[in-house]
């Protein structure tokens, strides 16, 4: 293979950037790949109008400009095998070789079905942040944010910064759970400061606990939502509903490589040892892929993987920091665990598979995922079962099966690309 | 960051937008949904990060492109389902 | 012990077609299938209902079966789409051999015509330049095979047939024993495709792996099922691996791409080298497709008999065990005719076509 790297890193969020920095400083020849045009992943996504978040502003260019780092933006991994990846960008596709692989491709939002969730105007909460940062028109729009987790606050702050009118934040966790969590925050002063800062930014915006959006309604577009809270049901008119129920690790690439997974609840994450190595000897995984842990954990574990993949020892301080950061993540997960009623919001006619318009009732007659798929096409659409599959896993149906290539929809010309090394080519 | 403007065409209408925004954001400025589902429902971007494929539209002649993953470029031709 | 007139092992396209016809003939039927209906080779079939003219026995069975398929054109879950078949001639030699193919198809009542270069590009503008012409079979169609299997089974169940979600552990003198020790007594019809040797090791069966690729929705790029005239060389040949140009427009607007053939592997994993070869060939004929997105790739195993023709008849050495298996790449097309052929023999009724070419006993023990 003509294009080879010592270390290929998939994902240029905090974990991938930290890994690239650590590995390149040890002299490794590194490729850093991301499907987006700009580095930063989701949590450090570059805002078209405001640039990168302050913490990322110096470190991202520093990493990308390091002599040992080849930055491959707008590049999608299509298929992964032992020692090689098939990648495609806007124009072409090729195989690249690696000695070590670091998976840092993060998490996506857990988007759960409820009546009206397919209406234009309904998005995820992390989605709202992503859309705002890519220039979505929010000035003067009435937005409700709902679901679960501190992401709701971050999304609200971003929306407000872009001129939206945030009508309220509706958190499904109970007031008691949040207050218990708040009392622990002193252990993570950085987080406590962050929380206080967000409170200030969001002053004046109602923040309700124990509340769930039951349905979204409107003709062709979102017009109103129904919320159920501790004081009963209310209806709100709004232009945009941003609802997200947490994060799900993007394990599909790891699965394709054969990495062992572990389940913490309904969703899998990648199993790693103390050096962030997976069950495949030359493949590492870090950050959200190994369990939802937030930005700090991602940066720390990315560094650890970068050191380890470069053959260096992991600085002891990093191990301590990792423990501390993962404790915070665990506390978060416990606080924001989903109330059971969220899994029963979808009605018989609520679409579960958005790509192929398959309602919940169509799935009832089938005992297993494959039967359901063959009969209804649920999961056979463009999202390759990512949205409906994670939703169904959360709802308690059908575990997800191992993915086949392409990892994401990929051009036929890409899949028709021969391996560049004639010795690895095909017999005639 | 973005005082530079870019001109694109959406469903034949000329639109001037800040450089660097996504095609999804540009189309949203016209308050248009982008896609009809297989059952005929109107859809718009949902996940914002290239996973859900609800934002697919025809960009520069190529169908089924994710608008949230594509930045606007001068002269770009965009068509949504109508 | 439960008694049935006929116990059908396997609920793929063959088993369910047999269940439909047997129950229609008044037999009390049990279908034994542990997995999804139509979940085996049926789920990896292209669903192209096609008459191939190279082998007379294959053509006779296809002709018989294609006429029977006409009864199902309006069934929603079958997704019957009469897009027609367009065989593509890459060179003058292939083009020159078309009239003899037309003649053979005509004897089987299949309406087809030779088309010249100009007509070819009118019918399919996306085809690569430099092709010589082709053969159009306008009334051929494509179906959704798992949907068809489900439909046939539903018809049987509506007539009182039962579905047993079990494996068959063994053939026994009175019938079959299931994996939960239950015994079903009655005549047995093995329609288990590539798994046939598990219960009937005396009939040779090979598994021939194939890959399929399906794209996102791009209506209007391809109008007919397209195959290269050399397709039969791949299908009837015995190479360890081969590919042939074979592309289908689905009613959804997606494009379904085949075909690959491979012996000597039993893993269902996608082989990127095989996919690459198959798509390289596809893009030679349809270069414009390169920019289209593929959503999924999957595999299946065609059951292949000793001589490429299916086994349709009484199992050698048995009185009350029958076989309908080994259809290679023509299972969907010939399912309906196969079902009638076997069950008519079982009921000692006259068969519509000569059953001898498919007699399992033809294979030397």
Image (cartoon, rainbow, N blue to C red):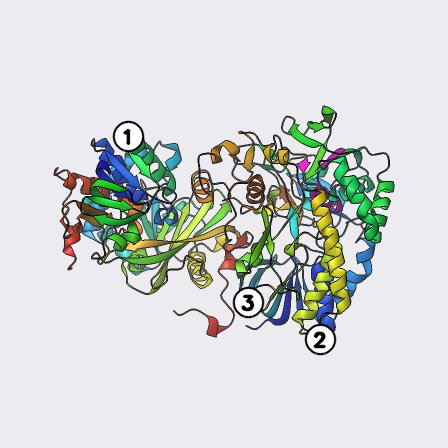
Magenta region includes residue C140: no
Provide residue C24's location: percent of width, then percent of height. 23, 31
Mark 1 and mark 3 residues within 8 Å of each other at the beta carbon: no
Residue topped by disc 3: A84
Residues behind callouts 1 and 3 on a single chain: no
Provide residue A158's location: percent of width, then percent of height. 79, 43
Q: Chain of mark 3?
A: A
For mark 3, give the secondary structure: strand
Residue at image location 54% in from the left, 72% down from the top: A1
For mark 2, give the secondary structure: loop
Q: Is residue C219 left or right of residue C317?
A: right
Magenta-colored span:
A117-146
Residue topped by disc 1: C160
Q: Residues within 10 Å of mark 3 (few under 14, many from 20)?
A: many
Residue topped by disc 2: A27
Distance from Cα at disc 1 to Cα at disc 2: 73 Å
Provide residue A231's location: percent of width, then percent of height. 75, 25
Q: Chain of mark 2?
A: A
Q: Residues within 10 Å of mark 2 (few under 14, many from 20)?
A: few
Q: Is residue C27 left or right of residue C279?
A: left
Q: Is residue A38 left or right of residue A113?
A: right
């Amino acid at each position: 293979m003509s294009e080879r790297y010592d270390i290929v890193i998939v994902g240029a969020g905090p974990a991938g950037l930290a890994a690239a920095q650590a590995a390149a400083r040890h002299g490794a020849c590194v490729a850093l790949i991301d499907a987006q045009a700009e580095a930063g992943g989701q949590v450090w996504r570059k805002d078209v109008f405001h640039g990168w978040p302050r913490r990322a502003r110096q470190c991202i260019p520093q990493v990308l400009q390091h002599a040992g780092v080849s930055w491959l933006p707008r590049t999608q991994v299509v298929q992964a095998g032992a020692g090689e990846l098939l990648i495609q960008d806007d124009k072409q596709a090729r195989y690249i070789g690696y000695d070590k692989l670091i998976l840092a491709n993060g998490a996506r939002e857990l988007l759960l079905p409820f009546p009206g969730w397919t209406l234009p105007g309904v998005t995820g909460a992390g989605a709202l942040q992503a859309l705002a940062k890519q220039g979505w028109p929010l000035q003067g729009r009435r937005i409700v944010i709902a679901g679960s987790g501190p992401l709701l606050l971050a999304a609200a702050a971003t929306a407000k910064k872009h001129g939206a009118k945030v009508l309220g934040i509706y958190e499904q966790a109970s007031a008691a759970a949040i207050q218990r969590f708040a009392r622990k925050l002193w252990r993570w002063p950085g987080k406590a400061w962050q929380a206080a800062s967000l409170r200030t930014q969001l002053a004046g915006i109602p923040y309700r606990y124990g509340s769930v959006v039951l349905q979204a309604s409107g003709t062709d577009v979102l017009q109103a939502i129904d919320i159920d809270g501790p004081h009963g049901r209310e209806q709100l008119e709004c232009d945009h509903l941003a609802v997200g129920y947490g994060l799900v690790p993007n394990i599909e690439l790891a699965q394709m490589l054969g990495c062992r997974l572990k389940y913490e609840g309904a969703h899998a994450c990648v199993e790693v040892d103390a050096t962030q190595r997976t069950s495949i000897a030359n493949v590492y995984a870090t950050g959200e892929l190994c369990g939802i842990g937030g930005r700090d954990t991602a940066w720390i574990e990315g560094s650890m993987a970068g050191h380890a993949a470069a053959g260096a020892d992991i600085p002891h301080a990093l191990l301590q920091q990792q423990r501390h950061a993962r404790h915070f993540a665990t506390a978060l997960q416990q606080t924001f665990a989903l109330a059971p009623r969220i899994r029963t919001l979808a009605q018989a006619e609520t679409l579960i598979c958005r790509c192929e318009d398959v309602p919940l009732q169509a799935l009832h007659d089938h005992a297993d995922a494959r039967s359901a798929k063959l009969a209804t096409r649920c999961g056979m659409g463009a999202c390759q079962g990512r949205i409906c599959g994670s939703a169904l896993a959360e709802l308690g149906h059908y575990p997800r099966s191992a993915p086949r290539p392409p990892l994401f929809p990929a051009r036929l010309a890409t899949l028709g690309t021969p391996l560049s090394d004639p010795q690895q080519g095909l017999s005639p | 960051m973005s005082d530079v403007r870019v001109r694109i065409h959406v469903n034949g209408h000329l639109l001037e937008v800040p450089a660097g925004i996504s095609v999804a954001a540009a189309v949203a400025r016209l308050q248009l949904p982008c896609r009809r589902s297989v059952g005929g429902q109107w859809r718009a971007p949902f996940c914002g990060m290239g996973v859900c494929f609800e934002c697919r539209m025809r960009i520069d002649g190529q169908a089924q492109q994710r608008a949230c993953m594509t930045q606007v470029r001068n002269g770009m031709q965009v068509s949504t389902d109508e | 012990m439960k008694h049935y007139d006929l116990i059908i092992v396997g609920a793929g396209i063959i088993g369910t077609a047999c269940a439909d016809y047997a129950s229609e003939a008044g037999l009390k039927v049990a279908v034994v299938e542990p997995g999804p209906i139509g979940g085996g080779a049926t789920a990896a079939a292209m669903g192209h209902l096609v008459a191939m003219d190279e082998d007379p026995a294959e053509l006779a069975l296809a002709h018989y079966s294609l006429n029977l398929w006409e009864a199902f054109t309006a069934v929603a879950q079958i997704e019957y789409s009469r897009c027609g078949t367009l065989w593509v001639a890459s060179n003058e030699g292939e083009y020159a051999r078309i009239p003899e193919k037309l003649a053979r198809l005509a004897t089987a009542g299949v309406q087809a015509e030779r088309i010249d270069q100009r007509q070819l590009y009118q019918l399919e503008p996306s085809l690569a330049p430099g092709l010589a012409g082709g053969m159009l079979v306008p009334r051929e169609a494509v179906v959704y095979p798992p949907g068809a299997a489900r439909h046939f089974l539903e018809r049987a169940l509506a007539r009182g047939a039962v579905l047993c979600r079990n494996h068959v552990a063994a053939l026994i003198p009175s019938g079959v024993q299931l994996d939960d020790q239950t015994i079903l007594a009655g005549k047995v019809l093995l329609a288990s495709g590539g798994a046939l040797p598990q219960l009937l090791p005396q009939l040779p069966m090979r598994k021939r792996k194939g890959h399929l690729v399906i794209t996102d929705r791009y209506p209007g790029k391809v109008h007919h099922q397209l195959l290269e005239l050399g397709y039969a060389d791949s299908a009837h040949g015995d190479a360890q691996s081969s590919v042939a140009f074979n592309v289908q427009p689905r009613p959804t607007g997606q494009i379904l791409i085949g075909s690959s053939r491979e012996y000597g592997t039993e893993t269902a994993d996608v082989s990127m080298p095989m996919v690459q070869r198959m798509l390289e060939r596809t893009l030679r004929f349809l270069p414009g497709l390169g920019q289209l997105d593929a959503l999924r790739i999957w595999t299946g195993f065609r059951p292949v008999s000793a001589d490429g023709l299916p086994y349709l008849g009484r199992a050698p050495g048995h009185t009350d065990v029958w076989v309908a298996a080994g259809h290679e790449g023509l299972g969907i097309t010939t399912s309906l005719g196969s079902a009638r052929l076997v069950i008519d023999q079982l009921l000692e009724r006259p068969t519509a076509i000569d059953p001898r070419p498919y007699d399992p006993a033809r294979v030397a023990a």
